[in-house]
Image (cartoon, coloured by chain):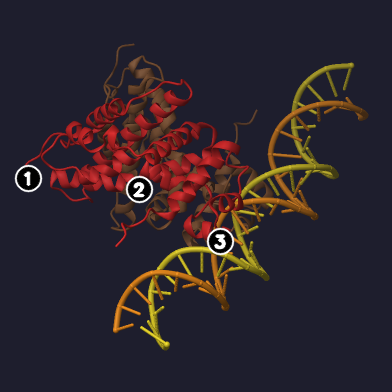
Chain colours: A brown, B red, C yellow, D orange
Amino acid sequence: MPADREDPRLTVSRHAAELFLARGVAATSGDDIAAAAGLSKRTVWRYFRSKESAVEPLFAVSSLRFANQLSEWPLDVSIETYLHAVVRPQDQTPREIADDILAVRLVALLPKEPALRSAWLMSCHAAEETIIEVVARRTRRWTTDFDVRLCGAAVMTALRIVDEDIATAAITDRREFTLPEVIDRMAEAIRTASTLPICDPVAP
Amino acid sequence: MPADREDPRLTVSRHAAELFLARGVAATSGDDIAAAAGLSKRTVWRYFRSKESAVEPLFAVSSLRFANQLSEWPLDVSIETYLHAVVRPQDQTPREIADDILAVRLVALLPKEPALRSAWLMSCHAAEETIIEVVARRTRRWTTDFDVRLCGAAVMTALRIVDEDIATAAITDRREFTLPEVIDRMAEAIRTASTLPICDPVAP
DNA sequence: AAACGTATGTCACTAAGTGACACGAGTCAA
DNA sequence: TTGACTCGTGTCACTTAGTGACATACGTTT
């Protein structure tokens, strides 16, 4: 049996991102995206509710990878230990690196493309829900608990701000970042923003 | 000379909100909004980039009123004192109360209307920028400072979560809230989420 | 009164997005 | 093998979202 293949939406997402970066959002049509991805435009509209939302899968696998990976964060390790253990430079495939660059360039484009910002915020909101589950697990409370939701949202916001900050620095200021450096900043931001004690090992 | 009149977009915003609530977003067209507001549809598209974004002015004046009012927060008062002083039940006009109800019903609708959620998040993002300025002022730092942005974003997120929480409780659980109660929850959430010391009086 | 900026309406147009139906590829059961 | 069943996709006609270009009206300034 074959390993389950990559989400086809992600492929389209990459093409959409390239086009948005090259020509701007307004100048690329749904037909352009469909043509670049080798699909009928009908399929594109089946994949995505709007052309801007076509970049959401890319955000999810790349910029929001840290957020998504927190789902498997074991109870008995700290945030720093876990992040450094799970996302390691030597494990990055060329494809992942390319996705990262693409996503970072997109995030740096947000100030000029409000339509993309709404896709970005929607992606972050999706990740927020999964982070809320993490917080619930680590605090032995419900996902509907107000303080749990507040903490999860604050943590997600911290990740978003770090992401935007790094993307801006990397693209406009041409600064370079190593992966461990990025991980450190993410972990530190999570720690700062946590309003509940989730960052250190918790009792099983 | 007459006092400057209300933003005409807000009027349209109210009509759009009513229609979205009555029929759902998908079932109300730009023409419907234009007709309800007594404008040509061309003017509606001049006011708003998309039909969903038509509710943003309503969010801004109502749900995000607290956030916006922080712009005038004096350095020498605490968050609790200021909020209680500036938004008082007896000052609420009937129109403001109606707007509040409308906005709360919209926020409660977010889980079922993803298109509205993106408008909501964009409104919150706009408010985030103004909160970042408040944080900068109270910490005597720049708005570009990373920690300032992080704190501002965390505070805005807290306000958003309280808002969503209250809206859900009010609509689905039919709970009732007094304004002082809401203010207390907002102030408490701001205090919890602040990652910099902005909530108490700061040195001039 | 003339000249100006700003806000709106009209109308024709492009592009975003949907509904309905057909087609082909992969199960799965007999 | 066959037939029925699902699932993803393509085709095409259609509706609605959204824009560009131009005309008109109103309040200000001079």
Q: Which residue is mark 2?
A: B126
The amino acid type found where label 3 is placed reads: Arg
Q: Where, quadrant-wise, is the N terminus of chain B in this rendering?
A: bottom left
- Element type at mark 2: helix
How far from the left and from the top, in percent, is residue A26? Answer: 52, 60
Q: Where, quadrant-wise, is the C terminus of chain B in this rendering?
A: top left
Q: Which residue is mark 1?
A: B204
Quadrant location of residue A154? top left
The amino acid type found where label 1 is placed reads: Pro
Pair 1/3: label in front: 3
Left or right placement of residue A15 versus residue B94 in this view:
right
Residue at figure coordinates x 48%, y 36% from the top left: B106
The amino acid type found where label 2 is placed reads: Ala
- Callout 2–callout 3 Cβ contact below 8 Å: no
How far from the left and from the top, in percent, is residue B37? Answer: 53, 51
| Pointer 1 or 2: first along the chain | 2
Task: Name the chain letter of the residue that bears numbered label 1.
Answer: B
Residue at figure coordinates x 31%, y 44% from the top left: B128
- Element type at mark 3: helix
Q: Dot 1, crowdedness within 10 Å: few (<14), some or many (≥20)?
A: few
The residue closer to the viewer here, C15 or B26, is B26
Task: Name the chain letter of the residue that bears numbered label 2.
Answer: B
Q: Which residue is mark 3?
A: B42
- Callout 1–callout 3 Cβ contact below 8 Å: no
How far from the left and from the top, in percent, is residue A51? Answer: 56, 51
